[in-house]
Structure formats: structure tokens, C-alpha cells
Image: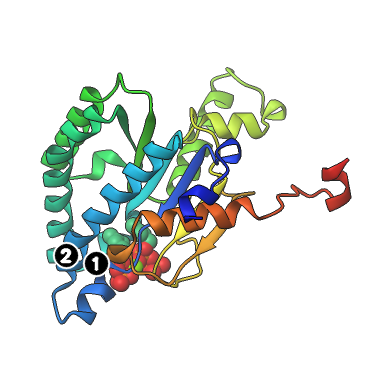
Amino acid sequence: MSLKEKINSSKLPQHIAVIMDGNGRWAKQKGAERIYGHENGVKSVRETVEAAAELGIKYLTLYAFSTENWNRPQEEVMALMQLLVHTISAETKTLNENNIRLAAIGDLKSLPSDCYNELQEAIKKTAGNNRTTLVLALSYSSRWEIINAVKEIAQKVQDGLMQASTINEDTINSHLCTADMPEPELMIRTSGENRISNFLLWQLAYAELYFTDKLWPDFRKEDFYEAIVDYQNRERRFGKTSEQLIS
Ligand code: IPE
Ligand code: IPE
Ligand code: MG
């Protein structure tokens, strides 16, 4: 039985989040510049998006650039932004052909203007699609997102639009960038690093975490299937006991 056949289509996660890590090390292993790794990571993005759409995963969030990544050497940051502009414009047609909607979370206004414009254009052009939503986390960090949410909520309280005592989980959820999305049930990180790196801290509260040593440019559909099969073999208890889940 192939890995794909092992996937139970009635138990699919609705939302999968991925930390695409290891591009720099992949390039280094090949004696190349870091950007060569980023360029080769694009194929893995294509494969993953295609696999998610084929399986019927409703939301796929890819961590492409963090707030902290701005602190990398300027040359790498610029090359990454150019790669982003180029990839988004080149892939819009394929997204439409496959009925995939593009969305983005993060401090998008901090992106270079050509990048921001290209992104908004692609989001607009794919807005009518409904098979899968591909969410790019760009200039994103979870602490940035939570700070923003707190500021907005505090402002509403100050303006008398809301009472502090009524703040609950839904209030927080609805002020995050992911307000209209289900929580990720599965988070995949490549490259053997076992950390979250400021990604969806609130939303991943009960997500299953899956770590693989594969470097991102080597990540293929089969690796994605493997993560889903692993996820489907876990027992998600949400604080309850195993016995409670059966009864
Ligand atoms: C992930 O690969 C891509 C981004 C963070 C933009 P890295 O560039 O972090 O690669 P490593 O972790 O240094 O190998
Ligand atoms: C996380 O990877 C961010 C992205 C994949 C975009 P990093 O390579 O920046 O994370 P750390 O620095 O290893 O934690
Ligand atoms: Mg890294």
C-alpha cells in the first residue's frame, strides 16, 4: 500500500501549517550560496501545495519569512524578496487552474512595494477559488500578531465598544490574522529543528507537531503524506483521558 493510500480521507486535517526550514544548509551541503537553497525550495512549495489540493486539505499555511528574518544579511533578504515577487507572479496562473486561493498573514506593509503589490494582485486574482486556501506567512511572527490583537481589543474597550470582562477565546481569535480560518491540526517543520520559532503560538495550542530531518528543498509529496499518516495515528485528547474519547 502506498503512503497516499494509507491516508484516511475522512480524518483529514482541515488546516496544515508548515515551517519550511533548511534551505541554507541544503545549499551549503552543495557548496552553493544560501539563495540557491531558497530557489530550490520553490519546487517543494509547488509539490506541497499540489499534494494538499489533491487531498482536499482546506488550508495550507506556509511560513515563508519571519519578522526575525529581516535581521539576516541584507543581500539574502533582498534576494528572498525578489524570489518571492517572481514566484508569486509566475505561479498565479497555476493557482487559478487548480482553483487555489492565495492569502497572506503578517506585517505585509513592511514588504518592499513591488512584493506587496504582486502579492495583493495575486490575492485578488485568486479570490474566487475555493478548493484550497494557500496562506503565506510573510513578515510574520506570532508575538507581533498577538500584540496587534491586544492593541485593537484595548482600543475597543477604551472606546466603550467592548467590556474587558467579556473578553474570551473568541475575542482573541477574531483579532488575529487567522480570524476566518480553522486552527491548524497539524504543524510540520523540516530540517531537524524542534522549535516553533514564533509561528502561530496561539493557534497551535492543540496542534500535533511533526518534525522531520529532511531539508526543505528535498521535501516532496511523499514526505507530506508521511506526516499526515503519522498525524492520523495519534490520539488527540484535548486534556481528556483516553477512555473518555472511546465512550
Ligand atoms: C528557511 O531556510 C527559509 C527561510 C527562513 C526564509 P533557512 O534559510 O532558515 O535555512 P537554514 O535553516 O539556515 O538551513
Ligand atoms: C523559521 O525559520 C522561519 C521560516 C521558516 C520562515 P528560521 O530558520 O528563521 O528559524 P530559527 O532561526 O532556526 O529558529
Ligand atoms: Mg532556518
**With respect to residue 55, does 39 lie above or below?**
below
The residue that appears at 16% across and 66% down in the rendered structure is 35
- Whether the residue carrying mark 2 lies under 8 Å from ligand 1 is answered with yes
Direction from residue 231 to residue 29 in the image, left or right? left
- Whether the residue carrying mark 1 lies under 8 Å from ligand 1 is answered with yes
The residue that appears at 54% across and 20% down in the rendered structure is 159
Q: Secondary structure at mark 2?
A: helix
Q: Which mark is residue 72?
A: 1
Residue type marked 2: Glu
Q: Nearer the viewer, residue 71 or 119?
A: 119
The residue that appears at 50% across and 57% down in the rendered structure is 227
Q: Is residue 108 visible?
A: yes
Q: Residues within 10 Å of mark 1 (few under 14, many from 20)?
A: few
Direction from residue 186 to residue 214 in the image, left or right? left
Q: Position of residue 245 (x, y in %)?
A: 82, 44
The residue that appears at 44% across and 39% down in the rendered structure is 55
| Marks 1/2: CA–CA distance | 7 Å
**With respect to residue 247, does 1 lie above or below?**
below
Q: Position of residue 192 (x, y in %)?
A: 44, 73
Residue designated by label 2: 76
> Does the CB distance between marks 1 and 2 fall below 8 Å?
yes
Direction from residue 231 to residue 17 in the image, left or right? left
Residue type marked 1: Arg
Which of the four quarters of the rendered structure image does ligand 1 lie in? bottom left
Q: Position of residue 80 (x, y in %)?
A: 17, 56
Count of all numbered marks drawn on residues in the image: 2
Q: Nearer the viewer, residue 12 or 1?
A: 1
